[in-house]
Amino acid sequence: MVLAEAVSKSFGTNEVLKSISLEVKRGEVMCLVGPSGSGKSTFLRCINHLEVVSSGRLSVDGDLIGYHEANGKLYEMHPKQAALQRRDIGMVFQRFNLFPHMTALENVMEAPIRVKRQSKAKVEASARALLARVGLAERADYYPAHLSGGQQQRVAIARALAMEPKLMLFDEPTSALDPELVGEVLDVMQGLAASGMTMIVVTHEMGFAREVADSLVFMDGGVVVESGVPTEVLANPQHARTQAFLSKVL
């Protein structure tokens, strides 16, 4: 579903990603872990072309992301074409970014109506089903200001799912939440994983990575230091840098 080939990204002289290559299979859940500044979130943003890669290639479901290839050269797509690709890739950020003037239901309905031009009646039925799926059927008419952080994040997940994405990206989705609200968001994500959704999750929740992920990638300094089956990496890390990091977070 996702293929990264020697992906690098620099901001000026700061090389944030250094030739990242990895593969995510259809239906797989991959967790990216590592210290702040290791490039995890930047890599996630490159997957849907929110950040433009400096070199290398990223493909989602066989389609090159953000570029056309002609005569062996890559040419960046027009922003409108890149936006069309982005419709198939759901993303949930650290901050919920809900539209404050819209109810939970309206937040979930907005993109399918505006972007996919679907009928309001069809979209509303689907949106209510999605809110029920994330445990918020009774909060459909609440505005974000009247929802807890965990509830807002669950609305954000429902909103991303409303576009029927083939891939979901999560950028530390629980890091802005009070500790007692983390579980309700992770439960929704675990349900998504069980349904077969392909997911890449940047997280510090090692329990989630151990229980739910199919693969775990430890990044530091813009490179993949170590990767493998989560239980094996967490229980028996092979690299000294991975050992040092996990000794502080486990």
Image (cartoon, rainbow, N blue to C red):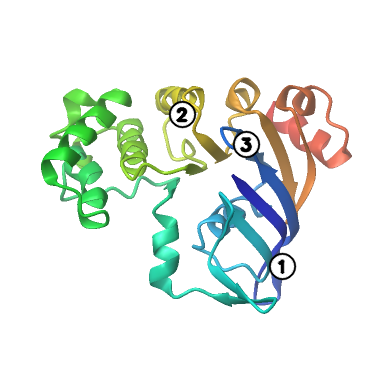
Rendered residue at 62%/36% (across/down)? 30
Look at the image and tell me whether residue 99 can be seen: no
Percent position of residue 202, x then y: 58, 42
Q: Secondary structure at mark 3?
A: strand
Percent position of residue 218, x then y: 73, 41
Contact check, label 3 and label 1, Cβ < 8 Å: no
Disc 2: which residue: 189
The image quadrant that residue 188 belongs to is top left
In this rendering, the count of numbered labels is: 3
The image quadrant that residue 209 belongs to is top right
Rendered residue at 46%/42% (across/down)? 166
Disc 3: which residue: 31
Q: Secondary structure at mark 1?
A: strand
Rendered residue at 48%/42% (across/down)? 168
Percent position of residue 3, x then y: 66, 51
Q: Amino acid at mark 3?
A: Cys
Q: Which mark is residue 15?
A: 1
The CA distance from mark 2 to mark 3 is 12 Å
Q: Amino acid at mark 1?
A: Glu
